[in-house]
Image (cartoon, grey):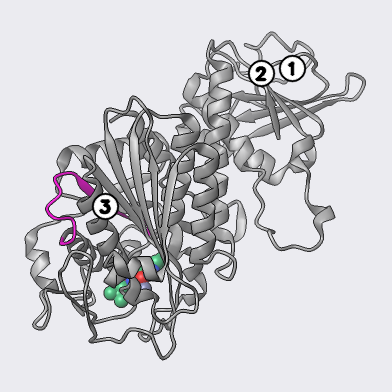
Amino acid sequence: MQLTTQVDHFNGLIILPFLENENAIQSRSEFPRAQVSSELFSGVKDSQFLIERTEENQVFLFIGLGKDPDYKSIKNAFRRLTAKQEKLFKEHVLLVLSEDFGEQAMEAAVSGLLLGTYRLGHFKSLEKTQKDWEKVKLGVSSSIPKAEEIVRRAEKIAAAQMETFKLVDLPPNTVTPQYLAEWAQSTGKSLGMEVKVFGRKKAEKEKLHAFLAVGQGSQKEPQFIVMEYRPKQALKHVGLVGKGVTFDTGGLNIKTQGMVHMKCDMGGAATVLGAMQLIADLGLQVQVTAIVPCVENAIDKQAYLPSDVIQSHSGKTIEVIDTDAEGRLILADALSYLVKNYRPEHIVDFATLTGSAVGTFGYECAALFSQNEELIQKLRKSGDAVGERIWPLPMWDLYKSEMDSEIADIKNYHGKPYAGAITAAKFLEYFTDGHASWAHVDIAGTAFGDSEFAKTKHGTAFGVHLLLKFMENL
Ligand code: BES
Ligand code: ZN
Ligand code: ZN
């Protein structure tokens, strides 16, 4: 879809969103010939009214947003239009926003319309059935002075989110560790970021033993991605880490449930990569270093064994109780590599880490872990602003002793059917070298899920917009 804020002709689809109000339509004077009585339409949430004026070649689409819609519901209302009513979108579309709609609402509306053009049929051979959104020109009319800037920003947000959807939705025989490494390299090149990638050999040299142990049972070479965004006037430095398990079979502790969904296990990597794209694309003045360890957790004669004791980058030894608790092993090396080599002021990791986080919060909220109250508040606020909810769970040291090992420094699983997300977070904390401002976000329930937009589970880009907000309000 092409965007323009130049509104010179009005032939085509005219979208008029309304807040709920008895005189919603009567209050609008720009289109005197498209009036509807308040009995038929008053802006009630999720309501719609269509008027076709064939002689003028205009279709008016009124959409109701309810009384006080939040960011996410505005975004979804618009996403729904392009996702489910694509036939209405011919060559020209005009979005007309009244003064009720401020900058945030405008951003939500435009990015929602763009997100709705995303389709899951990446491998469908009948190309002809796919709509060519490039032919649709979207104009935006608004009295907001910064309209042009907001439209461009919304476009970049949607582009990064759709890229994140795609990384998660593409199958694991496409999105391999190498695919993610190449994605990082080409995105880094086009947006001016430095990217380093360590394969098996270089990772061995760098002593990323825990990371390599997980990848041992796979044909696909593990790739440890380091991506650096260094703008000239940055005052702050943030480190990001994303779990990049391109498929999680469970390893020798093979999964008996839900394995078919485990292409989503690189959801943390996708969030971090998508956020890097967005941050660089918008030219934020914050230095960001992202570490994205990518492996496939598979099985063959080389695969690591339950009860193996492995080394790690930190020098601490780990007893592997369960090969399905692999995410924390690759994150342990990523965190300790980041802390040792880059010393960022704040660190946030995103990972589809535990079924326990899904059991606790379901699919609408991610689990947040940190000992830094200020960081907790900042992250929560950033997420709330854009409808990406996160909620803290405790990090008391009482839980750490659950992970004590008899044979090694720590074990990767306490072997009990409770407190799974918390004990996983305590395991990660052990590898952060007491960093004063680190947070872990367990997105197992939120990265990939069902929604009104598809028949199967799909990527959500959870965390990308949250991270943008977080960096903008540091
Ligand atoms: N990738 C899974 C966690 C997961 C579950 C992600 C559901 C997305 C949806 C993780 O590697 C895993 O297998 N966790 C185990 C850990 C256990 C063996 C200690 C779990 O949560 O059951
Ligand atoms: Zn696992
Ligand atoms: Zn996993």
Q: How many marks?
A: 3
Residue nearer the viewer, 129 or 156: 156
Q: Residue type at mark 3? A: Leu
Is residue 240 depicted above or below 19 in this figure?
A: below
Numbered tag placed on residue 35 in the rendering: 1
**Label 3 sits on residue:** 338
Marks 2/3: CA–CA distance: 42 Å
Q: Position of residue 442 (x, y in %)?
A: 32, 57
Task: Measure the alpha-carbon separation of dots 1 and 3.
Answer: 60 Å
Q: Residue at x 14, y 45 (%)?
A: 436
SS of the residue at dot 2?
Answer: loop
The residue carrying mark 2 is 5
**In the visual, does 89 lie left or right of 473?**
right
Amino acid type shown at disc 2: Thr
Query: Do the residues bearing badges 1 and 3 touch, measured as CB atoms within 8 Å?
Result: no
Q: Which residues are magenta?
A: 430-443
- Marks 1 and 2, how far apart in space? 25 Å
Residue 274 position within the rendered picture, expressed as x and y whole percent measured from the top left: 48, 46
Question: Among all residues in the image, which is located at the extreme bottom?
Answer: 301
